[in-house]
Image: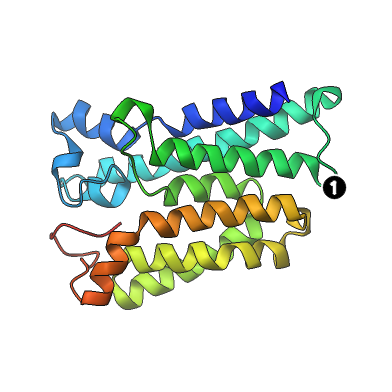
Amino acid sequence: MIHTLLIAVVSYFLGSIPFGYLLVRIFRGEDVRQTGSGNIGATNVARTGSKGLAIATLLLDALKGYVAVAHVFHFASHHPGDVPDFGPHTVYVLAALAALFALLGHMFPIWLRFKGGKGVATAVGAFLGIAPAAIAVVLVLFVAIVAVTRYVSLGSMVGAAVFPPAAWWLNPETRSPMVMVLIAASSLLIIVRHKDNIRRLLAGNENRFAGTKAGGA
């Protein structure tokens, strides 16, 4: 039990590192939360006028998710006797738990009064270590939707919705009820965090990727 708790806590604090906020504060002396949608993710960082910082935010947010999951596989391979038994695919259960808590850390970082981002890049990094084939499908779908509609939020939500069944189909290691529940919870969290985007999409005034209005992912 103690190891499961440690994995959750470590993953949360890794996920809670607000790279978008830190990079914009350090290199531009600005608070990214005062720009565009107020989000700390890469899309909103791009609205500060720095594509370089946006790319760095995207990569670092994905990396922290990946590290949270990679830590679980590293721990399990070096301390197999200390891994709690959750039945079939135990390591993947713990990895999916790490992914979920990394997402929670990004979305609700203690350092920013629990007001964080929407978790898309962090989820991609985390689940790349768990279901890489499914992530590849999601990324292709995301790019296609954004290319056609210019809505990053729509691509993100569709990708999140498609990911659980894609993981079940393409990555047999995830075919455990506990793994799928954790994956589905992560996907649902991402969609719920886009609730304002859903309202704007339905109203027809959602911000497109190339625009400058507040909104978006």
Residue 134 pos. (x, y %): 62, 62
* Among the 4 quarters of the image, the one containing residue 113: top left
- Location of the N terminus by quadrant is top right
At a point 57% along the width and 34% down the height, the residue shown is 68
Q: Is residue 139 above or below residue 46?
A: below
Q: Is residue 202 above or below residue 80?
A: below
Residue 172 pos. (x, y %): 78, 59
At a point 59% along the width and 57% down the height, the residue shown is 184
Mark 1 Cα within 10 Å, few/some/many (few <14, many 20+)? some
Colour style of the rendered protein structure: rainbow
User: Mark 1 = which residue?
Assistant: 88
- Location of the C terminus by quadrant is bottom left
159 relative position to 76: left or right: left
Q: Is residue 119 above or below residue 113?
A: below
Q: How many numbered circles does the render carry?
A: 1
At a point 13% along the width and 59% down the height, the residue shown is 212
The front one of 139 and 158 is 158
* Among the 4 quarters of the image, the one containing residue 101: top right
**Amino acid on which the number 1 mark rests in the picture:** Pro
